[in-house]
Image (cartoon, rainbow, N blue to C red):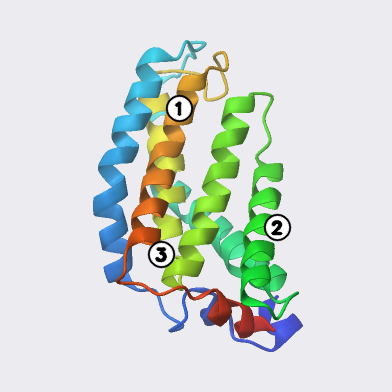
Amino acid sequence: MQRLLYGVRGRSLVSVVSRFRFDEFGRALVFAGPLSVLCITAVSLVTPVEPARFSTVDLVGLLAVTLLLTPLQAAGEEFGFRGLVLRVASSWSRDPRTSLVLGVVVSAVLFAAIHVQGNPWLNIHYLTLGVGAALITCRTGGLETAVVLHALNNTVGFAFALVLHTDLLGGTGAPVLLLLAVPTVATTAALLLSRRHRPTAEGVRTTTA
């Protein structure tokens, strides 16, 4: 779609260097991985849920699908929202600050909209993930860290639900669900405060302008 609309090769969606940077990926995984496991564990222990029954075959099959395909599904969403949508929205303005705001807001709102739930705390979590992933993408100039956060959120959450035999959408909404946003907030804050990266919103914007 990017090539059709803008004549730019798809690989440029990955990062400003048109390749997946495994060093960025590894650092994000080491930092956010333990936080994600800790926060999802806490939420799973204190949030009331409706028990679900799984046969052994169903449990093994669902767990295998979760571990193998969920990270790829999360990465695909990042290519769509923090890759294409972020860049398209950012290209609507030539002013760097306006470009950044447009890219972050449009991509985050659309991301939250397709994940909307009847639970307001989960909706806040999705919006936080959308905003954080967009800011991180602009800060680092690539999707690697956003992919890590999204994949951890989905994969670890689904795996816990299966192991604990719970309904993924069961339970009542509670503020404790905001713990799910902690890895995103912590990673975003760490990267925004870091001097090792320079903001790359202008580079992201001009890629598809």
Query: Is the residue under label 1 in contact with that under label 2 (CB below 8 Å)?
Result: no
For label 2, the residue is 106
Residue found at x 73% / y 76%: 93
For this rendering, which residue is in front, 79 or 164? Answer: 79
Coordinates of residue 25 in the picture (x, y in percent): 32, 63
Q: Nearer the viewer, residue 89 or 158?
A: 89
- The answer to whether residue 61 of the structure is visible from this angle is no
List the residue tagged with mark 1: 58
What element does badge 3 sit on?
Answer: helix
- Quadrant occupied by the N terminus: bottom right
Could you tell me residue 163's position as x and y percent? 35, 24
For the point 54% across and 82% down, the residue is 203
Query: Which of disc 1 and disc 2 is earlier in sequence?
Result: 1
Check disc 2: other Cα within 10 Å, few if <14, some if 14-19, many if 20+: some
Q: Is residue 53 above or below residue 3?
A: above
Residue 114 at x, y percent in the picture: 70, 44
Distance in Å between CA atoms under marks 3 and 2: 20 Å
User: How far across and how far down the image is residue 85, in percent?
Assistant: 67, 65
Q: Is residue 91 visible?
A: yes
Instruction: Please name the residue shown 64% across and 26% down the image.
Output: 120
Q: Which residue is mark 3?
A: 144
Considering only order in the chain, which callout, 2 or 3, is on the residue closer to the N terminus? 2
SS for callout 2: helix
- Say which amino acid is labelled 2: Val
Q: Which dot, 3 or 2, sits closer to the camera?
A: 2
Q: Amino acid at mark 1?
A: Asp
Alpha carbon distance from label 3 to label 1: 32 Å
Tell me the kind of residue under disc 3: Glu
